[in-house]
Image (tube, helix red, strand yellow):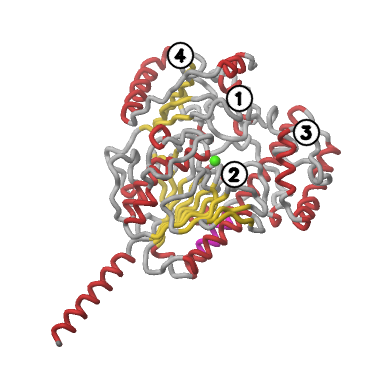
Amino acid sequence: MKSRIAILAFLISLTLGLTRAADARPNILFVFTDDHAPHAIGAYSDWLKNVNPTPNIDQLAQEGMLFENSFCSNSICGPSRAVILSGKHSHKNGFMNNGNSFDWNQQIFPKILQKAGYQTAIYGKSHLKGRPQGFDDWAVLPGQGLYYNPDLIFPDGRRRIDGYCTDIVTDLAVDWLKEGRAKDRPFMLMVQHKAPHRNWMPALRHLDLYDDITIPEPETLFDRYEDNAPPARYQELEVDRHMDLNYDLFVDLTPEFNQPPSQKRQDRSAWSNMKRMSPDQLGAWRAAYAPKDEAFHAANPSGKDLVRWKFQRYAKNYLRCIKGVDESIGRLRTTLQELGLAENTVVIYSSDQGFYVGDHGWYDKRWMYEESLKMPFIIKWPGVTAEGSRSRALIQNLDYAETFLEMAGAPIPSDMQGKSLVPLLQGRTPANWRRSIYYHYYEYPSVHMVPRHYGIRTERYKLIHFYQFGEEWELYDLKTDPDELTNLYGRTPFSDLTFDLKNQLVALQQHYEDDSDVREMPDEWQRRMRNQP
Ligand code: CA
């Protein structure tokens, strides 16, 4: 009898020991936003030092590690998320542009974490259509979602939640951390904000933020694309020619919200956003923006002055949305501390791609140029990442899945195409770390009219190939020309460099098995391109 008890006691202690060992695996809190350019983060850039929009994200960088050369593989919302979940380039995971539907039946890292004993949850923007798989709990916005009083889709159905989207998503995540999860297992929690995606609608508490500040204009605000290949002149994403005062900037929508001010599609859409607000919310919005609109009409700017005004309104609303995101990071980290989880939770901040905040005269993303190719990636892994460290290694969203799996001690499937960042996080860059990244964008014809292109970026150079309308190439030396204003392609001194980069590009396409450069376009779009200026 005594020996039986001893054996039982031994087995119990063994089980408890195993449970404790399992608990030692780190939790992962992955905060992910939509369209937050790295240069709109204090830790990345001095551009906004008079604005200070991201104190909490900057604090995370001070305590953890910041990646200076962090890139997406396809600069658009849904595809970036699909790459992250699958650890595969767009042509392999099948979600090449926002019009596609993600195949949730495929192998994705949250499913592998579940098998390894992790609890998983996702709240906020999915943008992949369909019912999420691989998550023990979830609530996702339908499509792009709305900033105010949004609907969310839960496992048991769709319902409206009153409030501001960034705050609601944070609430869901905080509630799950406090009450929703099983406390005896490690977790991977994805908090995916809609903000700061267009149309930029800040929280009511931030509507007057930055009113007394002039946002510094980017040096390339009036870029005329004189040295680019033709696609840069064919686009439709200029603050000047394409950004709409009503749809993008909500000018004059406040007094007459009961009716769309015109039958233009974009005006109706802006009206739908406003219509979603409660009378109290709308009243606060009106009170904040009516004086700004009056001042705009009184000044009646035109030409470059109008571009400058639009840039200020745009950048301020964008940064106000980012302020909401930054506060969310603060709340989530405070919650981890309150729950005693901070010391064993990896915290990551990233966003699905970069963005043009007036850079090159643009808004939106899609291009392989720096501002939208770059993604923020800031991470604190307590006990592993060195405080305030920075890495210049070339990393991509392609790498996140393998990184999370290695952190969790879970198996990494051989068909994933990234590289685990764990060695970099431990402060050592492997000798065979990648020396170039591969990019391929597909969403054309579509809004903003950025044609398909692929390319290679090394630490110093970038070679881009636009292939739908003849052979258009661009080559930039990022060391001497960080704003990518001088296209070196076809210039004699650079022919050897070009030859070498083209060979490297072909090698990358073979390595990733990418033969998806489909060139045939419908006649209608061929004609439309030819009729462009
Ligand atoms: Ca996005």
Name the residue that disc number 3 marks: 263
The span from disc 1 to disc 3 (Cα, nearest Å) is 24 Å
Query: Closer to the camera: disc 4 or disc 3?
Result: 3
Residue type, label 3: Gln
Q: Is residue 485 magenta?
A: no
Q: Is residue 62 visible?
A: no
Q: Residue at x 69, y 54 (%)?
A: 206
Identified at 32% across, 57% down, the residue is 116
Q: Residue 234 in the image: state x and y as whole percent.
A: 60, 21
Q: Secondary structure at mark 4?
A: loop
Q: Is residue 110 above or below residue 265?
A: below
For the residue pair 396 and 444, the one nearer the viewer reads as 444
Numbered badge on residue 235: 1
Q: Which mark is residue 490?
A: 4
In front: label 1 or label 3: 3
Point out the tag, 1 or 3, that comes first from the N-terminus. 1
Magenta stretch?
326-334
Cβ atoms under marks 4 and 3 closer than 8 Å: no
CA distance for labels 4 and 1: 23 Å
**Displayed quadrant of residue 342:** bottom left
